[in-house]
Amino acid sequence: MLIKDFEKLTIDAFTEEKLQFVKDKDEYGFTTMGSDEIKRVGYCTNLTIETAGEAARQKVDLLITHHDAWEWMTGMKEEALDILRKNDITHFFIHLPLDDAVFGNNTTILGKLGFRVVEKFANDDGMYCGRVGELDIPIEFKELAIKLEILLEEPVKVWKNNDRLVKRIGVVTGAGFSTTNIEEAVNLDCDVYLTGEKILYTVQYAMFRGINLIIGSHTFTEIFGLESLAELISERYPKLEIIRISEEHVE
């Protein structure tokens, strides 16, 4: 696969119309360019010094992440990109479009938990960062939390704010701490709200509105959209070697 082939695949997967919503907003794109030919692809949620180093050790030609390295972590992005450049690795990140995509973070995690997607919410400039999932047979809140811990391979934080069985769940994996998103989930008759980020008023507002709350890590609630994207790449280019770059459970 050549870089131009990957660019075309990206436009096909996310649609040019959707990408136009976030054009010039630093929500996707290349940050380093290596060799034009790609034989080995790696993916992970975050670009960090550690994941850049692991990509170099794994000798990938293209590293795909959900998050670019954070600009406000002074010096970290420069060092991570320096590692990639020295090892001739192309880096591409895809942020908001992956949250919105039909195969993205929220839809994929819902599918893995056994929910079917029935609604979109959390609109951000025409991109919907949240999804509502529904079960045919409701389950206990505790059972859902256990299923999520098994899926994420890490503990989750839970706040039980009602005694209802879980039939509907609202999910905003990233930047989901907003009370506005919780209010939308309540108005959409969700029994549970799941996100990968919280602050104090996330917890307080969920308690106030009586909606059960589950918090997983930002990193591991958002890996599943990348897995789905990797599957799309593999289907089109079956000879490519695609690997998941390991990240630590630090949150």
Image (cartoon, rainbow, N blue to C red):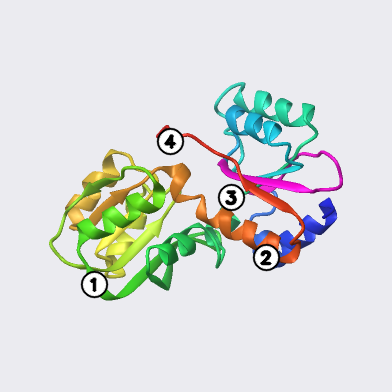
Disc 2 marks which residue? 13
User: Based on the displayed image, in which of its 4 quarters is residue 217 positioned?
Assistant: top left
The three-letter amino acid code for the residue at tag 1 is: Pro
Q: Mark 2 vs mark 3: which is more N-terminal?
A: 2
Q: Position of residue 120 (x, y in %)?
A: 44, 68
Look at 24% across and 49% down and name the residue there.
205
Extreme-left residue of the structure: 163
| CB contact under 8 Å: marks 2 and 1 | no
Disc 3 marks which residue? 95
Report, in whole angstroms, how far the alpha carbon at label 2 lies from the one at label 3: 14 Å
Which one is in front in this view, the residue at disc 2 or the one at disc 1?
A: 1
Write down the region rendered in magenta. 27-45
Report, in whole angstroms, how far the alpha carbon at label 3 lies from the one at label 1: 32 Å
Disc 1 marks which residue? 138
- The residue lying toward the viewer, choosing from 98 and 199, is 98
The three-letter amino acid code for the residue at tag 4 is: His
Q: Is residue 142 left or right of residue 181?
A: left
Which one is in front in this view, the residue at disc 2 or the one at disc 4?
A: 4
| CB contact under 8 Å: marks 3 and 1 | no
Q: Mark 3 vs mark 1: which is more N-terminal?
A: 3
The three-letter amino acid code for the residue at tag 2 is: Ala
- The residue lying toward the viewer, choosing from 171 and 40, is 40
Which one is in front in this view, the residue at disc 2 or the one at disc 3?
A: 2
Q: Mark 3 vs mark 4: which is more N-terminal?
A: 3
The three-letter amino acid code for the residue at tag 3 is: His
Q: Secondary structure at mark 2?
A: helix
Extreme-bottom residue of the structure: 136
